[in-house]
Image (tube, grey):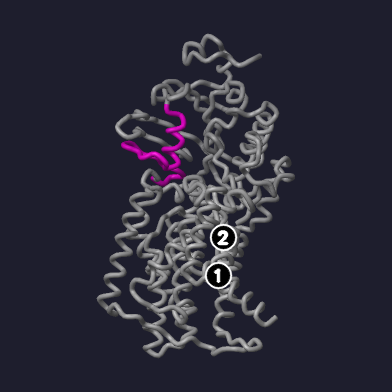
Amino acid sequence: MDFALIVLIELLRAVAGLVLIAAGLAIIFGMMRVINIAHGEFLMLGGYTVVLTTKLGVNLWVAILVLAPLFVGVFGVIVERCIIQFLYNRLLDSILATWGLSLLIIGAVTVVFGNTVEGVATPLGGFAIGDYKMASYTLVLIFAAALILAAIFAGLKYTRFGLIARSTMQNPGMAEALGVNSKLVYMATFGIGAALTGLAGGLLAPIAGVVPSMGVYFIGQAFITVVTGGSAIVAGTLSASTMLGTLSQSVTFMSGPVFGDAALLLVALILLRLLPQGITGRIFSRSL
Amino acid sequence: MPLLEIRGLRATYGPVPVLHGIELDVEEGELVGVLGHNGMGKTTLLRAIMGFVNVSGGSIRFDGQEIQRLPTWRRARLGMALVPQGREIFPNLTVLENMLVGVPRGQEPDARIEEILTYFPRLRELLDRRGGALSGGEQQLLALARCLCARPSMILLDEPTEGIQPSIIQEIAAVMGELRARQKLTIVLVEQNLDFIAALAERVLILQKGEITRQVDSRDLGNAEMMSAYTGFSTPAA
């Protein structure tokens, strides 16, 4: 019974991990159709914000929940104004530009912090389930992932900005004809996607080594999750994360993490062969 | 002073000139029709007024203000609205959400939607349906309702009867008549449907090859010889 509970929590942690790294990309790529190759570096910047500010004496939770999303969100707005705004509907150009941006960020961070692994201590200690011990922070990650998805859903469904953003992404010209400043909406939406990515980077900092090249590990999983999820941001991210995270973690339990990652890729390939528009292209197609 | 004042308006699509010095005055509360064959520049004229087409010369004044350098959203906030050809409904938003996009920030949306639905009772039953799932006629009603949510003082209507069933054309005509009777709404109507334009417009401008070549009293639209001489259009049914 204890073991089953531990397995369940570990599966939820795997799902939450995918939700966290994919949520910002679901907005930037899934909603805005911008392929941001620098997504992993946005995560890394969130991680470094936490490392740096906690070293300066800032409370860890303030660093994770406020400073990381704030810094990466503002950085995202600057990137949108300086680069991305000229590249909407220019897929190849946006890939090249954000790839260049990703290399630039990795280079700049390496120059400043060096190519060494930084980290912060995992807070909250642990708890026991029978003979097994588990980090309490795992529950924080699961709760945070659920909260982020709920917040995205509520923001898109029940706020005026969410409605305006959805209409603008569907038809920016018509939204403008109804008085919507579409440039501002694009900028803000990109900034929100970047802030969520920064938040994810901050949340992952205590359990992952923060290093300039850490984004490379996350970006593949993030894109696979968003593409597999399909067009619906919340339902797509949740369904793809649940499916891929559960399978990947189950294989990890049985055969180790390398096979777990391979299983994630294999399942994504099969799913996209069967459902080319992603899970929500066929199921939950009317969801957000 | 006219609500809309256009002087020497020129516009191009890339290197191709489309409008050649349009002169047009529209008074407040007036319904002006623009008639012309395909490719004569009717849609370009409306899109240039709304700010979607770069103007290469001339001026556009709306409510006394020069607007040709303003972005589309600023023009919309000044009180202009466009119902485009092809409707351009947001397909993944519900009917209610489509209308809510049109309600300006700071206004009470429920009251405005309720007011607009009195003109479009057919939409009341469709509020939760996705815009993309509506018929062409229902989408046209929604496009009109959505633009009215913004409380515009002038509407640019681009071929609202195109591909629409006759019962809905009558409904649109009735709504426009009612709107003009209740409010002092100014309308520029681009059409190829002579019956529709003759029934509604106070005067009709003939647009040929990017120029306004004639101005016709709407009563003369039934004059076969005159219309044939002007445009080659067939006359409306008696």
- What type is the residue that disc 2 sits on? Ala
What span is in magenta?
Answer: B41-66
Name which quarter of the figure residue A57 lies in.
Answer: bottom left
Residue A186, x across and y down, in percent: 44, 57
Is residue A286 at all visible to an observer of this figure?
Answer: no
Residue at 41 percent across and 86 percent down: it is A54
Looking at the image, the residue that sits furthest to the front is: A255
The disc numbered 1 marks a residue on which chain? A
Secondary element at tag 2: helix
Secondary element at tag 1: helix
**Residue at the disc numbered 1:** A249
Q: CA distance from mark 1 to mark 2?
A: 14 Å
Residue at 47 percent across and 11 percent down: it is B229
Looking at the image, the residue that sits furthest to the left is: A111
Name which quarter of the figure residue B194 lies in.
Answer: top right
Disc 2 crowd rating (10 Å Cα; few below 14, some 14-19, many 20+) is many
When the figure is inspected, residue A37 is found, relative to residue A65, above or below; the finding is above
The disc numbered 2 marks a residue on which chain? A
Residue B28, x across and y down, in percent: 53, 39
Q: Is residue A261 magenta?
A: no
When the figure is inspected, residue B147 is found, relative to residue A206, above or below; the finding is above
**Residue at the disc numbered 2:** A240
Looking at the image, the residue that sits furthest to the top is: B225
Residue B42, x across and y down, in percent: 46, 29
| Left or right of B4 on screen, residue A150 | right
Is residue B214 at all visible to an observer of this figure?
Answer: yes
